[in-house]
Amino acid sequence: MNRKEFRDLASPDEAREAIDSLSLEGGIERVPLEDARGRVLVARLDAELDVPGFDRASLDGYALRARDTFGADEADPARLEVVGEVHAGAKPEVALESGQAAEISTGAVMPDGADAMVPVERTDTDGDEVLVRTSVAPGDNVMFAGADVAAGERALGPGTTITPRDIGLLSALGIDEVPVRAKPRVGIVSTGDELVRPGEELHSERGEIYDVNSYTIAAGVEDAGGEAVLYPHAGDEQDEMEEILRSAAEECDLVLSSGSTSASAVDVIYRVIEEQGELLLHGVSIKPGKPMLIGRLDHSAYVGLPGYPVSAMMVFRTFVAPAIREAAGIPEPESATVSGRLARQERYEEGRHRLMPVGLVTDGAGETLVYPVDKGSGATTSLTHADGVVEVGPETDYLEKGEPVTVTLFSPEVRPPTLFGVGEGDPTVARLLDGLENPRYLSVGTRPGLRRLREGVPDVAVAAGPLERETETAELGQWDREWGLVVRAGNPTEIEGLEDLVDRDLRFVNRTTDSGLRSSLDAAIASLAENGGADRHEIVDSIDGFDLGLRAHESPARKVIAGDADAGLGLRETADRLDLGFVSLGQQPVRVLANPDRTAKDGVRELEAALSDVSSSDQ
Amino acid sequence: MNRKEFRDLASPDEAREAIDSLSLEGGIERVPLEDARGRVLVARLDAELDVPGFDRASLDGYALRARDTFGADEADPARLEVVGEVHAGAKPEVALESGQAAEISTGAVMPDGADAMVPVERTDTDGDEVLVRTSVAPGDNVMFAGADVAAGERALGPGTTITPRDIGLLSALGIDEVPVRAKPRVGIVSTGDELVRPGEELHSERGEIYDVNSYTIAAGVEDAGGEAVLYPHAGDEQDEMEEILRSAAEECDLVLSSGSTSASAVDVIYRVIEEQGELLLHGVSIKPGKPMLIGRLDHSAYVGLPGYPVSAMMVFRTFVAPAIREAAGIPEPESATVSGRLARQERYEEGRHRLMPVGLVTDGAGETLVYPVDKGSGATTSLTHADGVVEVGPETDYLEKGEPVTVTLFSPEVRPPTLFGVGEGDPTVARLLDGLENPRYLSVGTRPGLRRLREGVPDVAVAAGPLERETETAELGQWDREWGLVVRAGNPTEIEGLEDLVDRDLRFVNRTTDSGLRSSLDAAIASLAENGGADRHEIVDSIDGFDLGLRAHESPARKVIAGDADAGLGLRETADRLDLGFVSLGQQPVRVLANPDRTAKDGVRELEAALSDVSSSDQ
């Protein structure tokens, strides 16, 4: 086996076949009735008893012989001797003869000799006698033994997914434990020296990242009806990794490894498969997800998922989750689909089957627009910012803007956002969004936000700072925010303004030119240059760190906290929240601008209403 | 408060308002990431760090300065000095100057001085140098710090129901615990001396029944996103019941009691509510479900459900489950509805809003027929034999056959049966059904089965014994079964045939006239009378127990096991399975007859195919 060779990529169908040829089933287990909901019955359950187990009074009243009431009515009641009473949960201590009745409660056993009962509302008592003011037929108001379920009857068939209603039937039959399909045990092995478990300390400077795949895949496994078993992280130490793989294969029905980026991990997987397994397939002609392995490890099935989160999840969803559901006996969920039109042209380079994460937005005419979410396979937000997937066959090189496409939602519960916004990252915007129904907002910065608004995809854009170019938009609202330099708490370096950055030996952290903060900074520098008669370039060159812009809203402030910088471009609100010092450089306007075609859309109106409070309270 | 007064019944809307006025919310809890799937976030989560936390190589290859590759191509590569290597999870120990490159693995930290990277496939090595056969731009193949999520960005909004994709984002942010809405704790108190927990021994002779409501309601509570707490059974002892109610109210957000049939339970509930709570509503104008209580017990909400399983579940589904979902922050599920036509006329006596459990069957033309499932409120099978509910307003007295109705399925996962059969209970039929996709079969006996088939609702009927009346049907298959007398193991009373029942003092257990077994028995007695020149009535009168027919398939055999009878009417197969003795009285045919309009229906064809095996192997 040559692990570098992916020349003969398998087709998606071949990958499905390879997975189907493996057995993922977990066998049978017995679970108590309390835990049976949603589990899949493996065998038919027949009734072992009659339900009810006795002829049962359906109401409160009198048990009697129907024949004794024939002809009785309001005016001419039948008069019967009351010879006893029967309560629910008690054995009748009376047997009726002709002309007799017994008081009886709902649910009680009909006494011998009685063949019907009359509800108390249709009777009157007179000493030891009861006057029955209606005639009843044999069997009236009696639930006969076995009338609900009869002994020997087929109660539930094999393959039944147990609902609360079925639990009712099982309870009635006295069954307190049921044989169900065991959930397939799915071992999750993640490898790589760079991975750190969430909650532990992260050393970004040595390239550590939090382990995304283990938890995401585990949640996907449980969604599909499997039981996820997380194995401890293996670093890139081969012996350790081998031991973990082998014990996972022994303990599980399926082992999923998520691709380490290191060659040594792949080497170990290949060696273990070679020694005690079989490799059925390596490499699938799909994007994302090409580097996928399918095989057997000992008696366990094995799938090697790609390392990038989006690739791993796409491969999991497409190939692995259906196999887990099949093994768990859970029917494929109704896949919810949505039709729409592509919001922009998409080009494809390679002849691979493509699974494209997409977002949905409703345009002004109520039509659904579909836009690719293109943050890349390495970005977890490629999935959280998307609503579903569009599949594109390998023969397609590009899709035109406006092309009709069908989106398979990630799950039938996915609700496309009520509002789609883009633009500047801002704390007020974040708070506004919290009050809206189901918004999506991408903090791409002011400039890219305005560009996207012009391109017609989002509903609104948030722009901070001076507007450079006139865009045809509807302004929904605006407020001012205070911007400046975020410095260490107490401002120990005694920075008073921009001049200090120019004149003194201070380390500054800037934002990228996408940001509205940067536009205001650039304007301030231009005016500093003008007022001082200096050259703008000279000023900029003398600020240490001016050219290194960070993309992230709070990142400059965080560099200050980490001691990597003396001052960072930011907001007073950020400085206050992070307990840092702040040197104000002014106010800048933040505008919420809507696509003029979308102002009547519910989500946009909801935002506009929320904005009216902000604008009035902030001004 | 007068508990017998239900004259002023509240409307369903008033009941909804009363429940909405109670607070069921369980507050906030923090759950580990592994348990966060499906839970509802209570607060916005902002990113506390950049993801990735560093500029990251997207591929295996060489980090370099883009400027050094300008103009390079296949024919004229750029030649750079390789001055080190950087692995994922390690801090770079090299900084690049012009003309230099560093080997770098996917996911590794870009070294200082590098602003782009080139994939290994576009390079060749030559000693300590690398030949770069393409030109790259600054930023190429690099994922910048914060490009996935930037520190300070709004990651997930309040109210988000956490999906596996969200778990990916949370993992990437290193969040190992999230604040979610606590599941509302719902205490379930069931009362009544007659109730026995499943798994325990049942004494039918004193009217004991298994507790159906506790487990069914608990499953419903969990389905709705609550946490069910089952309290120990309270009998009808008032002090005990009061103590259980009070501790449930203290420990839970909502207490559900399911109506005891005894007056003392109701008395206790009224007293406790009077002493430390408030009764908002008693009695709702709905059927089933009228005797419903809504109120407060101390700081807990309280709903008293009716005692009959169908009534309890209907009231729970209609009024309580939505309130639990609301408190749990779970959106109302898309209610799946199906349109169809009523299969038979339905009459209503009272002016109450009605929730009618119905089954669905597809007719020969592919239309959906809707038939009421009318086993009564006391029967658990009224729900398991149904697919959903039709609501009928209080102003409606009857619905015509053929009337269009809308059925709300019990859940979107409900799949209407592929085949609907009725008729004789029979072990071969039960086995046949096990092999079919999603059948429904009601063991109503041969005669009622044939009657229903004539009425046009079911697809097929199973008839055993001599056919009394010609019905226009399509016979799908038939086989013979051996019937006779089921006796104690080893036949200790040495019964040889029917004559023994007539001549000797033996206790016999018969089946009702609905059963095909009974038809064969009646025919055998008729021929016994004819052959012996005796009167049929005389014979029948001299058999002890002949007139007492049981409705249930195996019940006579079980009476023999219990020692209540010497012989019971039954099948050889039943006797064999229960290790009893058997005296054969002959073979009887079992016919599977289809509605002639439905023979092309998939489910019917599937049954026909399965039958061809039975017929050939059994003949």
Image: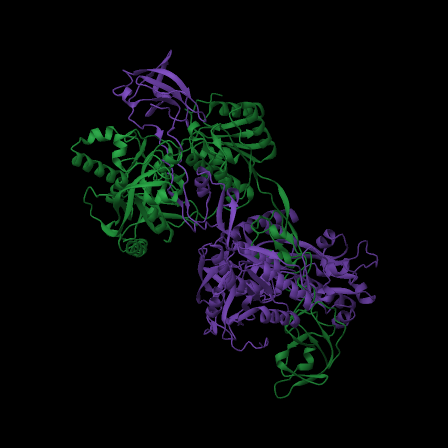
Chain colours: A purple, B green
- Can the viewer see residue B58 in this picture? no
Relative to B313, A80 lies left or right: left
Position of residue B178 measured from the top left corner of the image (x, y, whole percent): 64, 50
Relative to A356, B540 lies left or right: left
Residue B197 in the image: above or below residue A16: above
Position of residue B168 measured from the top left corner of the image (x, y, whole percent): 60, 58
* Residue visible at 55% across and 43% down in the picture: B328
Question: Which residue is more in the foreground, B344 or B192?
Answer: B192
- Residue A485 sits in quarter: bottom right
Position of residue B31 measured from the top left corner of the image (x, y, whole percent): 63, 48
Question: Which residue is more in the foreground, A604 or B483?
Answer: B483
Q: How many marks?
A: 0
Residue A220 in the image: above or below residue B254: below
Question: Which residue is more in the foreground, B239 or B411?
Answer: B239
Position of residue B184 measured from the top left corner of the image (x, y, whole percent): 57, 40
- Can the viewer see residue A49 in this picture? yes
